[in-house]
Image (cartoon, rainbow, N blue to C red):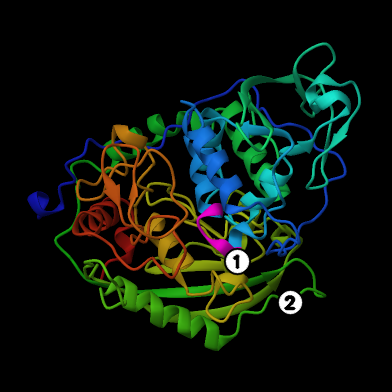
């Protein structure tokens, strides 16, 4: 075995998630379905207003994720013009602790829906310049969702009536914006909230909170297998197009799926056009069966957590099976990890296939990212600055980055946004590193040896 070649120097860690006694989500009334792409606003937030808010958030120690999200929206004129004007009112900001739980549980969220999240976190002043948490009646955000203040406490009620408290951070200097940090989350897309509730339930029943123990037991069961001396594999990929009813037809043609495989092979062979160095992973993928099924379990949001879908993708040695279904606004795609020894499910939204309806996401990169998870790769921010993704030649990151170009990681280094395991727009994603390739083969040799020839 090529143990020296396959060694991943960062100390191996698994994505252990902090167990919380309560999921702190502000309960929203009158929630409505938002369009995929927020519309251009007649009176959007201006560039100067954006910069003032970003500067204000940057002065706080626990709002780095929201500062990054504001930066993603404001640095692109088209995105900024889709955000309603945020001034002369009250802005509630999700703190890092809770946004990190969001990062751990919502894979590849639609970043345009952060615009909706901000609008549903902002309220015009009440009488005398008051904010909604100071009142007694429900208040409606500029985005249209309504929330209920706590009785006798500064905060908002969750779905159980418990109070999620707020802390004043002060007022911005010129746009008259009172800013409050929230001990929880507000303004989440309904699909994101559903995903977080499912994940939190797994914590409460001991599922994900025992992930490390389970992984260690599996590692012992495979003995001293650390990888494989095989560095090439041709893997058959089946696609199952799952519709929730016979009246709903997801668009996923043979041409789209064949184009997806062509792009996938370019990416995994190091031939994808890229401004950064990239490498050949040794994996190649070939078209298998394409089938159509009707199952109400594929209704939005479809997720790998719904194990009722396993019957459509029974495990077969040497094959990867992808379910095409409506994943909602997050995740665009989702995959089990290599060490999860069940069916190894992978789901993908039809909108992000080549020629799919989301033009900003339909370059095929979502499957490239999710397949990376399937083969054992983590996000660069999986363990934040304390280990990143367990690969030495990728930068540790404190938070996800949703834009292209060089950005500080929050861990004392820089990252250019080209790596397939990041969250930059698909037009920027084009590279794997040699360390990631080594990890793919290490994980394949340990957990998914049936994919090898």
Task: Identify the element where label 1 is drawn.
Answer: loop
Image height check: is 286 above or below 23? below
Query: Image check: 279 left or right of 255?
Result: left
Query: Image check: 151 left or right of 301?
Result: right
Would residue 32 be visible to someone looking at this image?
yes
Q: Can you tell which quarter of the image residue 385 is in?
A: top left
Query: Image check: 292 left or right of 412?
Result: right
Tell which of 181 and 439 is nearer to you: 181
In the displayed orientation, state which residue is furthest to the right. 137
Q: Position of residue 382 (x, y in %)?
A: 39, 41
Circle 2 residues within 10 Å: few <14, some 14–19, many ≥20: some
Query: Image check: 231 left or right of 346?
Result: left
Q: Which residue, given by chain and number where applicable, does mark 2 sit on?
A: 249
Magenta range is: 74-78
Q: Main secondary structure of the magenta part?
A: helix
Q: Which residue, given by chain and number where applicable, does mark 1 sit on?
A: 349
Would residue 205 be visible to someone looking at this image?
no
Tell which of 227 and 74 is nearer to you: 74
Task: Identify the element where label 2 is drawn.
Answer: loop
């Amino acid at each position: 075995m090529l143990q020296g070649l396959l060694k991943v120097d960062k100390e191996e860690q698994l994505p252990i998630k902090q167990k919380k006694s309560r999921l702190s989500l502000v309960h929203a009334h009158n929630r409505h379905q938002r369009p995929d792409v927020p519309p251009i606003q007649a009176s959007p937030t201006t560039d100067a207003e954006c910069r003032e808010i970003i500067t204000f958030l940057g002065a706080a120690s626990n709002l780095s994720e929201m500062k990054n999200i504001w930066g993603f929206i404001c640095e692109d004129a088209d995105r900024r013009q889709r955000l309603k004007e945020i001034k002369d009112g009250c802005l509630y900001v999700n703190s890092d602790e809770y946004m990190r739980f969001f990062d751990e549980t919502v894979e590849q969220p639609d970043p345009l829906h952060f615009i909706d999240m901000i609008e549903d976190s902002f309220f015009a002043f009440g009488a005398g310049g008051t904010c909604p948490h100071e009142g007694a009646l429900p208040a409606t955000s500029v985005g249209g969702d309504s929330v209920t203040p706590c009785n006798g406490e500064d905060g908002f009620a969750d779905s159980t009536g418990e109070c999620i408290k707020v802390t004043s951070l002060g007022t911005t200097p010129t746009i008259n914006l009172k800013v409050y940090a929230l001990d929880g989350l507000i303004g989440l897309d309904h699909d994101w909230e559903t995903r977080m509730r499912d994940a939190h339930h797994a914590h409460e029943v001991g599922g994900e909170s025992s992930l490390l123990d389970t992984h260690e037991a599996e590692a012992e069961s495979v003995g001293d297998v650390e990888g494989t001396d095989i560095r090439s594999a041709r893997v058959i990929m089946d696609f199952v197009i799952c519709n929730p009813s016979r009246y709903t037809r997801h668009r996923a043609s043979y041409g789209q799926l064949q184009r997806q495989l062509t792009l996938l092979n370019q990416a995994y062979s190091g031939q994808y056009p890229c401004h950064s160095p990239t490498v050949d992973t040794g994996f190649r993928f070939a078209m298998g069966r394409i089938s159509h099924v009707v199952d109400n379990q594929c209704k939005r949001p479809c997720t790998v957590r719904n194990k009722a879908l396993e019957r459509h993708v029974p495990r077969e040695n040497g094959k990867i099976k992808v379910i095409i279904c409506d994943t909602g606004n997050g995740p665009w795609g989702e995959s089990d990890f290599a060490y999860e020894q069940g069916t190894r499910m992978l789901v993908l939204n039809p909108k992000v296939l080549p020629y799919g309806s989301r033009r900003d996401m339909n370059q095929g990169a979502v499957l490239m990212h999710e397949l990376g998870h399937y083969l054992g790769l983590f996000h660069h921010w999986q363990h934040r600055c304390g280990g990143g993704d367990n690969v030495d030649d990728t930068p540790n990151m404190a938070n996800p980055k949703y834009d292209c170009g060089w950005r500080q990681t929050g861990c004392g280094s820089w990252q250019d946004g080209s790596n397939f395991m990041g969250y930059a727009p698909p037009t920027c994603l084009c590279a794997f590193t040699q360390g990631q390739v080594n990890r793919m083969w290490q994980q394949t040799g340990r957990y998914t040896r049936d994919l090898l020839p």
